[in-house]
Amino acid sequence: MNRIVTLDEFIIHRQKDFPYASGELTGLLRDIGVAAKIVNREVNKAGLVSILGVANTENATGDTVQKLDLYANDKLIDCLKNSGECCGIASEENEDFIKIPSVESKSAKYVVVFDPLDGSSNIDVNVSVGTIFGIYRRKSDANGDCKLEDFLQKGSELVAAGYVIYGTSTILVYSTGRGVNGFTLDPSIGEFCLSHKDIKIPERGNYYSVNQGYYLKFDVEMRRYIDYCSDLNLRLRYIGSMVSDVHRTLFKGGIFLYPNTRKFPHGKLRILYECNPLSFIVEQAGGKALTCDLERILEIEPVDLHQRSSIVVGSPAMVDDMKNFVEKYSMPTPYVENGAATNGAKPA
Ligand code: P6P
Protein backbone atom coordinates (compact mmCIF):
# COMPACT_ATOMS: atom_id res chain seq x y z
CA MET A 1 0.00 0.00 0.00
CA ASN A 2 1.44 3.37 -1.00
CA ARG A 3 2.43 5.73 1.80
CA ILE A 4 -0.26 8.33 2.51
CA VAL A 5 0.76 11.78 1.24
CA THR A 6 -1.50 14.49 2.64
CA LEU A 7 -2.33 17.71 0.79
CA ASP A 8 -0.39 19.72 3.36
CA GLU A 9 2.69 17.53 2.97
CA PHE A 10 2.47 17.66 -0.83
CA ILE A 11 2.06 21.45 -0.95
CA ILE A 12 4.98 22.01 1.40
CA HIS A 13 7.14 19.53 -0.52
CA ARG A 14 6.26 21.17 -3.86
CA GLN A 15 7.17 24.58 -2.49
CA LYS A 16 10.76 23.58 -3.32
CA ASP A 17 9.73 23.88 -7.03
CA PHE A 18 9.62 27.63 -6.48
CA PRO A 19 13.09 28.82 -5.40
CA TYR A 20 11.81 32.25 -4.39
CA ALA A 21 8.71 30.92 -2.62
CA SER A 22 8.46 32.30 0.87
CA GLY A 23 5.51 30.19 1.96
CA GLU A 24 2.60 32.56 1.39
CA LEU A 25 1.15 30.56 -1.52
CA THR A 26 1.69 27.36 0.45
CA GLY A 27 -0.26 28.85 3.33
CA LEU A 28 -3.03 30.05 1.05
CA LEU A 29 -3.48 26.64 -0.59
CA ARG A 30 -3.61 24.99 2.82
CA ASP A 31 -6.25 27.48 3.99
CA ILE A 32 -8.38 26.72 0.93
CA GLY A 33 -8.05 23.02 1.82
CA VAL A 34 -9.36 23.76 5.32
CA ALA A 35 -12.29 25.75 3.92
CA ALA A 36 -13.09 22.85 1.60
CA LYS A 37 -13.29 20.45 4.55
CA ILE A 38 -15.66 22.79 6.38
CA VAL A 39 -17.90 23.20 3.32
CA ASN A 40 -17.77 19.45 2.67
CA ARG A 41 -19.05 18.76 6.21
CA GLU A 42 -22.19 20.82 5.53
CA VAL A 43 -22.70 19.69 1.92
CA ASN A 44 -22.62 16.06 3.06
CA LYS A 45 -25.39 16.58 5.59
CA ALA A 46 -27.33 19.20 3.63
CA GLY A 47 -30.37 16.94 3.57
CA LEU A 48 -30.42 16.74 7.35
CA VAL A 49 -30.19 20.33 8.39
CA SER A 50 -32.17 23.37 7.48
CA ILE A 51 -29.65 24.79 5.07
CA LEU A 52 -31.43 23.39 2.05
CA GLY A 53 -33.79 25.36 0.01
CA VAL A 54 -33.53 28.69 -1.56
CA ALA A 55 -32.35 31.66 0.44
CA ASN A 56 -34.64 33.82 -1.73
CA THR A 57 -31.80 36.07 -2.68
CA GLU A 58 -30.15 36.57 -6.04
CA ASN A 59 -26.37 36.67 -6.49
CA ALA A 60 -24.33 39.18 -8.46
CA THR A 61 -25.20 37.52 -11.72
CA GLY A 62 -28.90 37.10 -11.11
CA ASP A 63 -28.89 33.40 -10.11
CA THR A 64 -31.18 32.40 -7.24
CA VAL A 65 -28.93 31.65 -4.26
CA GLN A 66 -29.33 28.45 -2.23
CA LYS A 67 -28.61 28.67 1.48
CA LEU A 68 -25.59 26.37 1.06
CA ASP A 69 -24.15 28.85 -1.44
CA LEU A 70 -24.20 31.49 1.26
CA TYR A 71 -22.73 29.12 3.83
CA ALA A 72 -19.89 28.08 1.51
CA ASN A 73 -19.25 31.69 0.58
CA ASP A 74 -19.04 32.79 4.21
CA LYS A 75 -16.70 29.94 5.19
CA LEU A 76 -14.32 30.55 2.30
CA ILE A 77 -14.21 34.27 3.05
CA ASP A 78 -13.61 33.64 6.76
CA CYS A 79 -10.75 31.19 6.06
CA LEU A 80 -9.10 33.54 3.57
CA LYS A 81 -9.54 36.57 5.82
CA ASN A 82 -7.77 34.75 8.65
CA SER A 83 -5.02 33.37 6.41
CA GLY A 84 -3.10 36.64 6.28
CA GLU A 85 -1.85 35.66 2.81
CA CYS A 86 -4.70 37.16 0.78
CA CYS A 87 -5.43 40.89 0.40
CA GLY A 88 -8.65 40.56 -1.61
CA ILE A 89 -11.43 38.22 -2.70
CA ALA A 90 -13.83 38.14 -5.65
CA SER A 91 -16.73 35.71 -5.37
CA GLU A 92 -19.64 34.79 -7.62
CA GLU A 93 -21.87 35.62 -4.66
CA ASN A 94 -20.61 39.17 -4.19
CA GLU A 95 -21.29 42.06 -6.54
CA ASP A 96 -17.97 43.73 -5.78
CA PHE A 97 -14.59 42.42 -4.64
CA ILE A 98 -13.80 42.28 -0.92
CA LYS A 99 -10.79 44.14 0.49
CA ILE A 100 -9.21 42.34 3.43
CA PRO A 101 -8.27 45.19 5.75
CA SER A 102 -6.08 43.52 8.37
CA VAL A 103 -2.61 45.09 8.34
CA GLU A 104 -0.88 41.77 7.57
CA SER A 105 -3.32 40.86 4.81
CA LYS A 106 -3.21 44.29 3.27
CA SER A 107 0.43 43.73 2.35
CA ALA A 108 -0.30 40.15 1.27
CA LYS A 109 0.83 39.20 -2.25
CA TYR A 110 -2.26 37.36 -3.51
CA VAL A 111 -5.93 37.78 -4.38
CA VAL A 112 -8.34 34.87 -4.67
CA VAL A 113 -11.34 34.43 -6.97
CA PHE A 114 -13.89 31.69 -6.39
CA ASP A 115 -17.28 30.24 -7.08
CA PRO A 116 -18.08 28.88 -3.62
CA LEU A 117 -20.61 26.31 -4.75
CA ASP A 118 -20.87 25.78 -8.48
CA GLY A 119 -23.89 23.85 -9.72
CA SER A 120 -25.84 24.69 -6.58
CA SER A 121 -29.18 24.11 -8.32
CA ASN A 122 -28.28 20.40 -7.93
CA ILE A 123 -27.91 20.50 -4.14
CA ASP A 124 -31.50 19.58 -3.31
CA VAL A 125 -31.39 16.53 -5.58
CA ASN A 126 -28.09 15.20 -4.26
CA VAL A 127 -26.10 15.73 -7.45
CA SER A 128 -22.42 16.65 -7.15
CA VAL A 129 -21.47 20.30 -6.79
CA GLY A 130 -18.13 21.98 -6.31
CA THR A 131 -15.96 24.90 -5.30
CA ILE A 132 -13.78 26.52 -7.97
CA PHE A 133 -10.86 28.84 -7.10
CA GLY A 134 -8.06 30.81 -8.71
CA ILE A 135 -5.12 32.67 -7.17
CA TYR A 136 -3.45 35.73 -8.72
CA ARG A 137 -0.45 37.75 -7.63
CA ARG A 138 -1.69 41.27 -6.89
CA LYS A 139 -0.64 43.98 -9.38
CA SER A 140 -1.47 47.02 -7.23
CA ASP A 141 0.87 48.69 -4.71
CA ALA A 142 1.42 46.27 -1.81
CA ASN A 143 1.10 49.11 0.69
CA GLY A 144 -2.48 49.97 -0.27
CA ASP A 145 -5.81 48.21 -0.57
CA CYS A 146 -6.23 45.72 -3.37
CA LYS A 147 -7.78 47.15 -6.53
CA LEU A 148 -10.04 45.93 -9.36
CA GLU A 149 -6.96 45.52 -11.58
CA ASP A 150 -5.76 42.78 -9.23
CA PHE A 151 -8.74 40.64 -10.25
CA LEU A 152 -9.15 41.55 -13.93
CA GLN A 153 -6.18 39.48 -15.03
CA LYS A 154 -5.95 36.95 -17.86
CA GLY A 155 -6.22 33.29 -16.87
CA SER A 156 -2.67 32.83 -18.13
CA GLU A 157 -1.57 35.00 -15.17
CA LEU A 158 -2.98 32.56 -12.62
CA VAL A 159 -0.44 31.51 -10.00
CA ALA A 160 -2.60 28.56 -8.98
CA ALA A 161 -6.10 27.23 -9.62
CA GLY A 162 -8.21 24.29 -8.63
CA TYR A 163 -11.54 22.91 -7.60
CA VAL A 164 -13.15 20.72 -4.97
CA ILE A 165 -15.90 18.36 -6.10
CA TYR A 166 -18.36 17.18 -3.43
CA GLY A 167 -19.56 13.94 -4.97
CA THR A 168 -19.39 10.23 -4.19
CA SER A 169 -16.12 11.27 -2.62
CA THR A 170 -14.68 14.72 -2.02
CA ILE A 171 -11.72 15.42 -4.29
CA LEU A 172 -9.51 18.51 -4.43
CA VAL A 173 -7.69 19.01 -7.75
CA TYR A 174 -5.17 21.84 -8.15
CA SER A 175 -2.22 23.09 -10.14
CA THR A 176 0.44 25.74 -9.57
CA GLY A 177 1.48 25.57 -13.21
CA ARG A 178 3.63 22.44 -12.79
CA GLY A 179 1.08 19.71 -13.58
CA VAL A 180 -2.20 18.67 -11.96
CA ASN A 181 -2.71 16.52 -8.87
CA GLY A 182 -5.83 15.21 -7.14
CA PHE A 183 -6.44 14.57 -3.44
CA THR A 184 -9.32 12.56 -2.00
CA LEU A 185 -10.67 13.43 1.43
CA ASP A 186 -10.30 10.56 3.90
CA PRO A 187 -13.03 11.33 6.46
CA SER A 188 -11.50 8.88 8.96
CA ILE A 189 -8.44 11.12 9.36
CA GLY A 190 -9.91 14.41 8.05
CA GLU A 191 -7.12 14.79 5.50
CA PHE A 192 -7.02 15.23 1.72
CA CYS A 193 -4.70 12.41 0.56
CA LEU A 194 -2.87 12.24 -2.79
CA SER A 195 -4.98 9.92 -4.96
CA HIS A 196 -4.43 11.11 -8.56
CA LYS A 197 -0.80 12.04 -9.26
CA ASP A 198 0.15 14.06 -12.34
CA ILE A 199 -3.27 13.91 -14.05
CA LYS A 200 -3.21 13.92 -17.88
CA ILE A 201 -6.38 14.30 -19.97
CA PRO A 202 -6.82 11.61 -22.66
CA GLU A 203 -6.22 12.79 -26.26
CA ARG A 204 -9.82 11.85 -27.04
CA GLY A 205 -12.80 10.53 -25.08
CA ASN A 206 -16.17 8.86 -25.59
CA TYR A 207 -18.19 11.66 -24.01
CA TYR A 208 -19.46 15.02 -25.13
CA SER A 209 -21.14 17.34 -22.62
CA VAL A 210 -23.58 20.06 -23.63
CA ASN A 211 -27.10 21.14 -22.69
CA GLN A 212 -28.89 19.51 -25.64
CA GLY A 213 -32.01 21.45 -24.70
CA TYR A 214 -30.46 24.58 -26.23
CA TYR A 215 -29.43 22.83 -29.46
CA LEU A 216 -31.70 24.91 -31.69
CA LYS A 217 -30.39 28.10 -30.09
CA PHE A 218 -26.75 27.38 -30.89
CA ASP A 219 -24.97 28.80 -33.95
CA VAL A 220 -24.91 26.48 -36.95
CA GLU A 221 -21.26 25.51 -36.54
CA MET A 222 -21.93 24.33 -32.97
CA ARG A 223 -24.96 22.35 -34.10
CA ARG A 224 -22.87 20.72 -36.86
CA TYR A 225 -20.17 19.75 -34.34
CA ILE A 226 -22.75 18.35 -31.89
CA ASP A 227 -24.30 16.34 -34.74
CA TYR A 228 -20.80 15.05 -35.55
CA CYS A 229 -20.34 13.87 -31.93
CA SER A 230 -23.69 12.13 -32.12
CA ASP A 231 -22.79 10.52 -35.47
CA LEU A 232 -19.63 9.18 -33.81
CA ASN A 233 -21.89 7.52 -31.20
CA LEU A 234 -20.22 9.47 -28.43
CA ARG A 235 -22.17 9.40 -25.17
CA LEU A 236 -23.91 12.59 -24.04
CA ARG A 237 -23.30 13.34 -20.36
CA TYR A 238 -24.50 16.62 -18.86
CA ILE A 239 -24.76 17.12 -15.08
CA GLY A 240 -25.52 20.85 -15.12
CA SER A 241 -22.65 21.52 -12.76
CA MET A 242 -19.63 22.77 -14.69
CA VAL A 243 -17.13 21.56 -12.12
CA SER A 244 -18.61 18.03 -12.30
CA ASP A 245 -18.80 17.95 -16.09
CA VAL A 246 -15.23 19.23 -16.45
CA HIS A 247 -14.00 16.81 -13.75
CA ARG A 248 -15.38 13.85 -15.72
CA THR A 249 -13.91 15.30 -18.93
CA LEU A 250 -10.50 15.66 -17.26
CA PHE A 251 -10.48 12.10 -15.94
CA LYS A 252 -12.22 10.23 -18.79
CA GLY A 253 -11.48 12.47 -21.76
CA GLY A 254 -14.16 14.18 -23.85
CA ILE A 255 -15.38 17.70 -24.45
CA PHE A 256 -17.54 20.15 -22.49
CA LEU A 257 -19.32 22.90 -24.39
CA TYR A 258 -21.36 25.87 -23.24
CA PRO A 259 -21.84 27.85 -26.46
CA ASN A 260 -23.42 31.28 -26.71
CA THR A 261 -27.20 31.36 -27.09
CA ARG A 262 -29.77 34.08 -27.65
CA LYS A 263 -30.26 34.30 -23.85
CA PHE A 264 -26.52 34.42 -23.27
CA PRO A 265 -25.05 35.96 -26.46
CA HIS A 266 -21.57 36.00 -24.87
CA GLY A 267 -22.00 32.65 -23.14
CA LYS A 268 -23.31 31.94 -19.62
CA LEU A 269 -20.25 30.83 -17.70
CA ARG A 270 -18.16 33.38 -15.81
CA ILE A 271 -14.61 33.94 -16.94
CA LEU A 272 -12.97 34.81 -13.63
CA TYR A 273 -14.11 32.00 -11.34
CA GLU A 274 -15.46 29.28 -13.63
CA CYS A 275 -13.82 29.32 -17.09
CA ASN A 276 -10.31 30.47 -16.18
CA PRO A 277 -9.52 28.16 -13.23
CA LEU A 278 -10.98 25.09 -14.95
CA SER A 279 -9.29 25.95 -18.27
CA PHE A 280 -5.98 26.43 -16.42
CA ILE A 281 -6.32 22.95 -14.90
CA VAL A 282 -7.30 21.30 -18.21
CA GLU A 283 -4.44 22.98 -20.11
CA GLN A 284 -1.99 21.93 -17.39
CA ALA A 285 -3.25 18.36 -17.91
CA GLY A 286 -2.64 18.60 -21.67
CA GLY A 287 -6.10 19.68 -22.81
CA LYS A 288 -7.37 22.81 -24.58
CA ALA A 289 -9.92 25.53 -23.77
CA LEU A 290 -11.32 27.98 -26.32
CA THR A 291 -14.28 30.28 -26.75
CA CYS A 292 -16.71 29.43 -29.56
CA ASP A 293 -14.91 32.18 -31.51
CA LEU A 294 -11.72 30.11 -31.10
CA GLU A 295 -10.02 32.53 -28.69
CA ARG A 296 -7.91 30.82 -26.02
CA ILE A 297 -9.87 31.22 -22.77
CA LEU A 298 -6.73 32.02 -20.77
CA GLU A 299 -5.92 34.94 -23.08
CA ILE A 300 -9.22 36.79 -22.56
CA GLU A 301 -8.67 40.21 -20.95
CA PRO A 302 -11.63 40.45 -18.52
CA VAL A 303 -13.17 43.91 -18.04
CA ASP A 304 -15.75 42.95 -15.40
CA LEU A 305 -15.66 40.66 -12.34
CA HIS A 306 -18.71 38.72 -13.55
CA GLN A 307 -18.01 38.77 -17.28
CA ARG A 308 -19.24 35.70 -19.15
CA SER A 309 -17.85 33.70 -22.05
CA SER A 310 -18.72 30.79 -24.27
CA ILE A 311 -16.40 27.84 -23.67
CA VAL A 312 -15.32 24.58 -25.25
CA VAL A 313 -12.86 22.67 -23.04
CA GLY A 314 -11.45 19.15 -23.00
CA SER A 315 -9.38 16.60 -24.89
CA PRO A 316 -7.02 18.33 -27.32
CA ALA A 317 -7.95 16.28 -30.40
CA MET A 318 -11.68 16.89 -29.78
CA VAL A 319 -11.24 20.64 -29.28
CA ASP A 320 -9.28 20.65 -32.56
CA ASP A 321 -12.20 18.86 -34.27
CA MET A 322 -14.58 21.54 -32.94
CA LYS A 323 -12.21 24.24 -34.20
CA ASN A 324 -12.34 22.71 -37.70
CA PHE A 325 -16.14 22.81 -37.66
CA VAL A 326 -16.17 26.47 -36.63
CA GLU A 327 -13.70 27.37 -39.38
CA LYS A 328 -15.73 25.41 -41.95
CA TYR A 329 -19.30 26.37 -41.03
CA SER A 330 -19.30 29.68 -39.15
CA MET A 331 -21.10 32.47 -41.00
CA PRO A 332 -18.86 35.51 -41.59
CA THR A 333 -20.00 38.47 -39.52
CA PRO A 334 -21.68 40.77 -42.07
CA TYR A 335 -19.28 43.58 -42.88
CA VAL A 336 -21.13 46.87 -42.47
CA GLU A 337 -20.03 49.55 -44.94
CA ASN A 338 -21.34 53.10 -44.63
CA GLY A 339 -24.04 51.78 -42.31
CA ALA A 340 -25.25 49.22 -44.84
CA ALA A 341 -24.77 45.48 -44.20
CA THR A 342 -22.94 43.68 -46.99
CA ASN A 343 -23.25 40.04 -47.89
CA GLY A 344 -20.23 38.83 -45.98
CA ALA A 345 -16.66 39.44 -44.98
CA LYS A 346 -14.91 42.80 -45.31
CA PRO A 347 -13.49 43.20 -48.82
CA ALA A 348 -9.70 42.68 -49.03
P1 P6P B 1 -27.70 25.32 -17.78
C1 P6P B 1 -24.50 26.13 -12.76
O1 P6P B 1 -25.57 27.02 -12.51
C2 P6P B 1 -23.71 26.67 -13.94
O2 P6P B 1 -23.22 27.94 -13.66
C3 P6P B 1 -22.61 25.70 -14.30
O3 P6P B 1 -22.08 25.04 -13.21
C4 P6P B 1 -23.29 24.75 -15.27
O4 P6P B 1 -22.39 24.17 -16.21
C5 P6P B 1 -24.28 25.66 -15.99
O5 P6P B 1 -24.57 26.73 -15.09
C6 P6P B 1 -25.57 24.93 -16.32
O6 P6P B 1 -26.36 25.84 -17.05
O7 P6P B 1 -28.17 26.51 -18.58
O8 P6P B 1 -27.32 24.16 -18.67
O9 P6P B 1 -28.64 24.91 -16.67
Image (tube, rainbow, N blue to C red):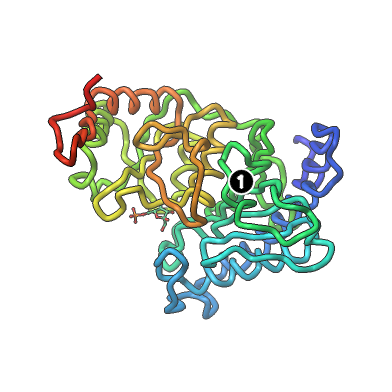
Q: Is residue 42 left or right of residue 259?
A: right
| Residue drawn at the location 68% of the way across and 60% of the way down | 88
Give the camera-side residue of 274 and 240: 274
Q: Amino acid at mark 1?
A: Gly
Q: Is residue 146 left or right of residue 231?
A: right
Give the camera-side residue of 242 and 275: 275
| Residue 264 visible in rendering | yes
Q: Tell me: is circle 1 under 8 Å from ligand 1.
A: no
Q: Is residue 241 left or right of residue 196?
A: left
Q: Quadrant of ligand 1?
A: bottom left
Q: Position of residue 245 (x, y in %)?
A: 44, 45
| Residue drawn at the location 67% of the way across and 44% of the way down | 183
- Neighbour class for label 1 at 10 Å: few (<14), some, many (≥20)? many
Tell me where residue 34 sits by quadrant. bottom right
Tell me where residue 14 sits by quadrant. top right
| Residue drawn at the location 49% of the way across and 40% of the way down | 300
Question: Residue at the front extreme?
Answer: 338
Q: Quadrant of the C terminus?
A: top left
Q: Position of residue 325 (x, y in %)?
A: 27, 26
Which element type, helix, strand or loop, lies under badge 1? strand
Q: Is residue 312 left or right of residue 38?
A: left
Q: Quadrant of the N terminus?
A: top right
In the rendered image, the vertical position of residue 162 relative to residue 252, given as above or below: below
| Residue 4 visible in rendering | no
Give the camera-side residue of 310 and 49: 310
| Residue drawn at the location 14% of the way across and 39% of the way down | 340
Q: Position of residue 302 (x, y in %)?
A: 50, 47
In the rendered image, the vertical position of residue 158 relative to residue 221, given as above or below: below
Residue tagged by mark 1? 162
In the rendered image, the vertical position of residue 245 relative to residue 252, given as above or below: below
Question: Residue at the top extreme?
Answer: 348
Q: Position of residue 259 (x, y in %)?
A: 32, 43
